[in-house]
Image (tube, rainbow, N blue to C red):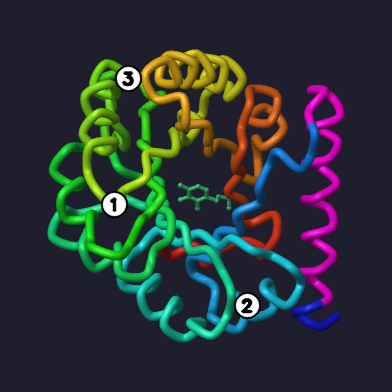
Amino acid sequence: MSRRDEIAANLAVVKDRIAAACADAGRDPGEVRLVVVTKYFPASDVRLLADLGVTDVGENRHQEAEAKAAECADLDLTWHFIGGLQSNKAAAVAAYADVVESVDRAKLVAPLARPGRPIDVLLQVSLDPPGREGRAGADPADLAALAAKVAETEPLQMRGLMAVAPLGADPAPAFERLAAIHRDLLVDHPGATWLSAGMSGDLEHAVRHGATHVRIGSAVLGSRPSVQ
Ligand SMILES: *Cc1c(COP(=O)(O)O)cnc(C)c1O
């Protein structure tokens, strides 16, 4: 089987899963955007994805993402940055990313704001218990202030929230909590309708709880090299 055939077959399975989850939840599948996470996979795979109709790709490491976006600059793709962001790298990320999903502190906001780059911003919210080691994402209590800062910063577009289900825990209650946090955010930011949640293992739970974007890596591209 060619790499193209393999990716095409996997894409079909993932799209069926999204459609089935939408049907179960009484949602229109057109409300859920598939972001294929291409980290650790080569630019040649990104080309195959674009050719197979994928419109959105996600990357989580700046150097790798920057190189791949440059190699694929001729493709009409929306690039999502979904990884931990250092404030000294934020301006460089904003040069190629169309969507930055992992904004979790105020210090990132000013460097992301580049003239002529109206980037779509999602705030990453932590669904882990406070104090957990390696916790990524803002504390839900800090979101209102962070959202206000993004909303007042030109030319950034305050679009919504992103979250990852807690490791080793049932994703359903976590995504239910995320949906409630999102409803709170929408009171002050009615345009912040995007909710990026769900990965290869838990996309059904995320769709049930209102995800508008799912970030799928291994279910489309196969397992990543174990040295991460
Ligand atoms: C790697 C990654 C994904 C994709 O994970 P899979 O389990 O391979 O689908 C989604 N979101 C984030 C933030 C990631 O880093």
Name the residue carrying label 1. Answer: 155
Give, as a three-letter code, the residue at label 1.
Pro
* Image-based side of 179 in relation to 132, left or right: right
- First reached walking from the N terminus: tag 3 or tag 1: 3
On whether residue 201 falls in the magenta region, the answer is no
- For the residues marked 2 and 1, what is the alpha-carbon distance in whole angstroms? 32 Å
Name the residue carrying label 3. Answer: 140
Q: Quadrant of the C terminus?
A: bottom left
- Mark 1 element type: loop
Please state which of residues 5 and 214 is positioned toward the viewer in this rendering. Answer: 214
- For the residues marked 3 and 1, what is the alpha-carbon distance in whole angstroms? 24 Å
Instruction: Answer above or below: position of 96 versus 160.
Output: below
- First reached walking from the N terminus: tag 2 or tag 1: 2
Give the x, y percent position of residue 97. Answer: 39, 63
- For the residues marked 2 and 3, what is the alpha-carbon distance in whole angstroms? 36 Å
- Mark 3 element type: helix
- First reached walking from the N terminus: tag 2 or tag 3: 2
Residue 45 image label: 2
- Mark 2 element type: helix
* Image-based side of 23 in relation to 63, left or right: right
